Image (tube, rainbow, N blue to C red):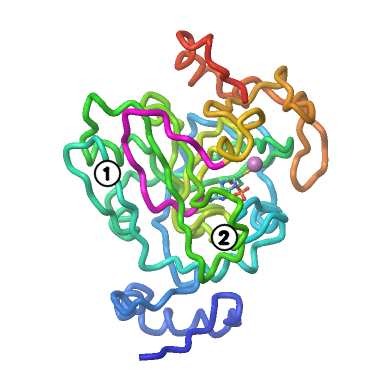
Amino acid sequence: MLIQIPRGWEIPERDVTPEPLAFGRRAALAALAGTGIALPAAAQEIPAATRNLRYRGERDITAEREATTYNNYYEFGTDKGIHRAAQRLPQRPWTLRVEGLVDRPREFGIEDLLRTMPIEERVYRLRCVEAWSMVVPWTGFPLAALLEQVGPRTEAKYLRFETAALPGVMPGLRQSWYPWPYVEGCTIEEGMNDLSFLVVGAYGKPLPPQNGGPIRFHQPWKYGFKAGKSLVRISLVAERPKSFWEAIQPSEYGFWANVNPEVAHPRWSQATERVLGTGERIPTRLFNGYGEFVAGLYTNLQRERLWT
Ligand SMILES: Nc1nc2c(c(=O)[nH]1)N[C@H]1C(S)=C(S)[C@@H](COP(=O)(O)O)O[C@H]1N2
Ligand SMILES: [Mo]
């Protein structure tokens, strides 16, 4: 059967809203479940979330428009203006597989995660290795809560994050010299740290595809490239995974990639950053200002290249 579905951005706002309102959003979603029909982002929901005040943005929250229209998502292209192209990424159905050295490997549907995980809002800073930064109210849950569900084994030392690679909707995949799919990684200890956050929303709304919807990762003390978008698989492994950027240019992008103003990128300084939206230049902080929560992870790793 051939079904013609308008893509998210082709549906005028007025056409999206009335139907879910008339029939109830849940009912409308249920009617589509299992049909394989991709829902436009506007028809999805995330639970209302309470803000976790343990982690403070400390700076003004970036305008939503800036954060959702200035993106790095190479699967859709190498420039920052991929937000329209990214609307083609289907957000439902979506499953995240968690597997490897675990007692109970499992596939989680995005709706299961939204229903069962401890959803909260966190205002986090994001510092891109390119020296721009933003502050975003993300909705999500700690990665540790998901790992608890699968029972990591003691042999598991690292996490490998794999993100979606859909050639039909991602023109960037035609650039075959890139080592697709986009892969990132961290240690189990880093992943279990409470700051490690799986993000399903931003600004109180479902996470837009250009920001990594329907689910992406974020570790705010590391450079932004560590935060894989549109995750499809998390593997618990014994060996350190090789990441996308490390495979491309190991001298510039390493495994740890902790933010440090004193360690320059080979081609530019990391001492300051440009604030997205205002253009202001401000000093960059060690661990992006999250040292009190994470510095202890690295005390026995001084021989590692922790800052690239
Ligand atoms: N799959 C995938 N994830 C990705 C990227 C990418 O190109 N593909 N870019 C990374 C980089 S370099 C940054 S800075 C952040 C940007 O997230 P944002 O667009 O929400 O600001 O996403 C990261 N995650
Ligand atoms: Mo980045």
Q: Is residue 175 visible?
A: yes
Asked if residue 85 is positioned above or below residue 138 in the image, the reply reads below
For the residue marked with disc 2, what is the amino acid?
Answer: Leu
Q: Is residue 88 magenta?
A: no
For the residue marked with disc 1, what is the amino acid?
Answer: Glu
> Which residue is denoted by mark 1 in the rendering?
99
Q: Which mark is residue 24?
A: none
Where is the C terminus found, in terms of image quarters?
A: top right
* Residue 294 position within the rendered picture, expressed as x and y whole percent measured from the top left: 49, 20
Question: Where does the magenta region start and end?
Answer: 229-244
Q: Which mark is residue 173?
A: 2
**Residue 57, picture quadrant:** top right
Q: Secondary structure at mark 2?
A: helix
Q: Is residue 253 left or right of residue 148?
A: right
Instruction: Please state which of residues 203 and 103 is positioned toward the viewer in this rendering.
Output: 103
The residue under the point 59% across, 50% down is 178
